[in-house]
């Protein structure tokens, strides 16, 4: 079970890093790419259900919270794996 948890955490971390990078590039128009509203489309499934609560906060915080929503899921996955390793 330990190997499966490690692979899940590493896989989720890689997907999260790629999605956050694409979000930053698409939001700020880096490397000559046009900025667009679909920049965070890959962060949405990774950050569910926490990204559904982003609109409670002020609008200037939305991009930062969109990037941090999958981090909450990553922390939860790590905590579940640590809890499962102790049992």
Image (spheres, helix red, strand yellow):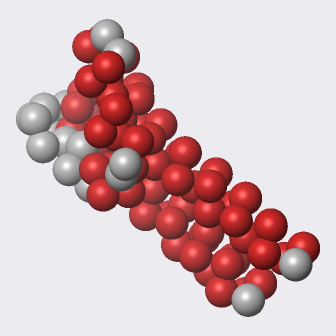
Position of residue 30 in the picture relative to residue 61 (left or right): left
Residue 86 location (% of width, % of height): 90, 73
Res 20 visible:
no
Q: Residue at x 58, y 76 (%)?
A: 8
Nearer the observer, 70 or 29: 70
Res 76 visible:
yes
Nearer the observer, 62 or 16: 62
Residue 53 location (% of width, % of height): 34, 32
Position of residue 69 in the picture relative to residue 13 (left or right): left
Is 3 above or below relative to 25?
below
Q: Residue at x 62, y 55 (%)?
A: 76
Q: Quadrant of the C terminus?
A: bottom right
Q: Residue at x 26, y 13 (%)?
A: 59
Residue 68 location (% of width, % of height): 47, 37
Is 70 above or below relative to 1?
above
Residue 44 location (% of width, % of height): 28, 50
Q: Residue at x 34, y 40 (%)?
A: 51
Task: State the residue lying farthest toward the right.
Answer: 86
Is 29 above or below relative to 20?
above
Q: Quadrant of residue 50?
A: top left
Nearer the observer, 15 or 47: 47
Q: How many marks?
A: 0
Q: Quadrant of the N terminus?
A: bottom right
């Amino acid at each position: 079970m330990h190997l499966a948890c490690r692979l899940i955490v590493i896989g989720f971390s890689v997907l999260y890093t790629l999605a956050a990078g694409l979000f930053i590039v698409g939001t700020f128009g880096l490397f000559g790419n046009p900025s667009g509203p679909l920049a965070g489309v890959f962060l949405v499934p990774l950050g569910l259900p926490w990204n559904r609560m982003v609109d409670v906060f002020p609008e200037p915080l939305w991009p930062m919270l969109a990037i941090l929503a999958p981090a909450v899921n990553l922390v939860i996955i790590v905590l579940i794996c640590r809890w499962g390793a102790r049992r």
